[in-house]
Amino acid sequence: MSEKKEILIVGAGLAGISIAWHLAKKNISFDVIDCGINHSSAIAAGLINPVVFRRMAKSWRVDEFLPYADSFYKEMSSELGQQYFHPIPIRRGFAHQQEYDLWIQKQDEPGYQAYLKELDEEDINFNDLKNICGTGKVLGAGYVSTKHFLEDAKKWLTSNHQLHTENFNYDLLNPETGTYKSNQYKLIIFCEGYHGLDNPWFNYLPLQATKGETLSIESNEIKTNETLNRKCFILPIEGNKFKVGATYVWNDRTLNTTEEGKNEIIKLLDLLISKNYTITEHQAGIRPTVLDRRPLIGKHPVFHKLTIFNGLGTKGYLMAPLLAKECVEYLIDDKTLDKEIDIKRYQSKLNN
Ligand SMILES: Cc1cc2nc3c(=O)[nH]c(=O)nc-3n(C[C@H](O)[C@H](O)[C@H](O)COP(=O)(O)OP(=O)(O)OC[C@H]3O[C@@H](n4cnc5c(N)ncnc54)[C@H](O)[C@@H]3O)c2cc1C
C-alpha cells in the first residue's frame, strides 16, 4: 500500500468486489484488504430467485435488481473472460393447495408475467420431482458460479495491485482522520460480511450471523435442466453434478459442518426426489443477515469517513450489484440513499 489511494475497502467478498468494480468504473483509486478466507460468498450456491415462495410474491425491488445484476455479471464476464451468471428456471413443487391457488392468482397480476409462467397441463403433471399438487416454473432465475466469480475478481484486483491479503486491525485505524497504518484515506468502506459483528464502530447495528450448510452431490438418475425447489433446492451445475441446500441457523458463527445439517438436507431432498445420489462435498458458511431483511448501508453518524456496506442476507447475488452502484453514487456523487437500506433507520440504537 505504498501509492496513495483515495478509498480503503475492507473485505473482498461479493460486497467488497461489487463496490470495487463500481469505483474502478469511476476511475477512483482504492485499496482492498481481505484476510484471504471467505465463509459466505464462496460457499453460496449463488442462486438468483426473483420470487419469495412464502407469499408467492415478487422479491423486493426485483424489477430493478435483476436487469442490473444481469448487465453487471455480463460486463464482468466480458472483461474477465468467463460466464458468471447462468440463466436457469426454477421448478417450484407446490407444497400445498394454497400455493397452487396463490400462483394462479398471481400469474395474471400486472408485473408477474416475467417471473411466473402461466400454468399448463405439463406443469401440473410434472414428474421429475415428487409432485404433491402441481408445479410452477419461475422465469428470470439463474445462478452465479460463485467460485469462479470470486477467484477472477481477486485476480483482477491483484493484477492492479489493489488487493492486500492481511487481517484488518481496528486498533490501527484513526476513525477521525481515516488513517490506517501510515495511509490516509478519504473513506473506509467496511464490507466484512458477518465479521461486521466485531466492528467497533458499527456493532450497534442489528447484523446477525445466519449459518447455512450445503451439499454437493453427483447422480446419473437426476435429469433436470431446471433448479428443483420445495423446502430445499437442487441446482444442476454441470453434467451429473448438483448443489443442494441450504439450512438456516440463526445467531450461529461456528464454521464446522454438522451431521445435523447434513441429515436435514438429506431429509428434505428425499421429500423432493426419489433418486440415488452420492454426496461429494459438505460445506458450511455464514450469511450476514438483518432482522428487517434490508441491507445496512451508509456513513457512520459520527465518524463520516467510515461507511458500511453489509447485510446482503440470503439474496446477495441478486442485490449486490445495484446496491453497490447506489452506495458509490451516495459516497461520490452525494446522491440520497433509499431509506429502506440507509443505516439511519437504526440511529436511535447508537447510544443504547
Ligand atoms: C450456505 C449459504 C448459501 C447461500 N446461498 C445463496 C444463494 O444461493 N444466493 C444468494 O444470493 N446468496 C446466498 N448466500 C448469501 C451470500 O453468500 C451473501 O449474501 C454474500 O455472499 C455476502 O457477501 P459479503 O461480501 O457481505 O460477505 P462475505 O462473503 O463474508 O465477505 C466478507 C469478506 O471480508 C473479509 N473480512 C472480514 N473481516 C475482515 C478483517 N477484519 N480483515 C480482513 N478481511 C476481513 C472476509 O474474509 C471475507 O472475505 C448464501 C450464503 C450461505 C452461507
Image (spheres, rainbow, N blue to C red):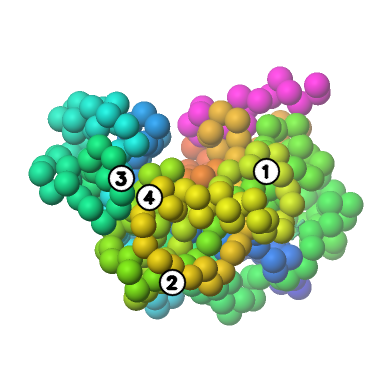
In this view, the residue farthest toward the left is: 121
Range of residues picked out in magenta: 337-352
Query: Which amino acid does the dot numbered 2 rest on?
Result: Glu
Q: Quadrant of ligand 1?
A: bottom right
Q: Earlier in the sequence, mark 2 or mark 1?
A: 1
Q: Nearer the viewer, residue 221 or 73?
A: 221
In this view, the residue farthest toward the right is: 171
> Image height check: is 124 above or below 160?
above
Q: Earlier in the sequence, mark 1 or mark 3?
A: 3
Q: Report the residue at 60% width, 40% height from top.
A: 289
Give the secondary structure at mark 3: strand
Quadrant showing the C terminus: top right
| Residue denoted by label 2 | 218
For disc 2, the neighbor class at 10 Å (few under 14, some 14 to 19, many from 20) is some
| Residue denoted by label 3 | 92
In space, the residues marked 4 and 2 are separated at their CA atoms by: 16 Å
Q: Report the residue at 11% width, 42% height from top.
A: 120
Q: Nearer the viewer, residue 282 or 298?
A: 282
| Residue denoted by label 1 | 209
Q: Report the residue at 57% width, 32% height from top.
A: 342
Q: Earlier in the sequence, mark 2 or mark 3?
A: 3
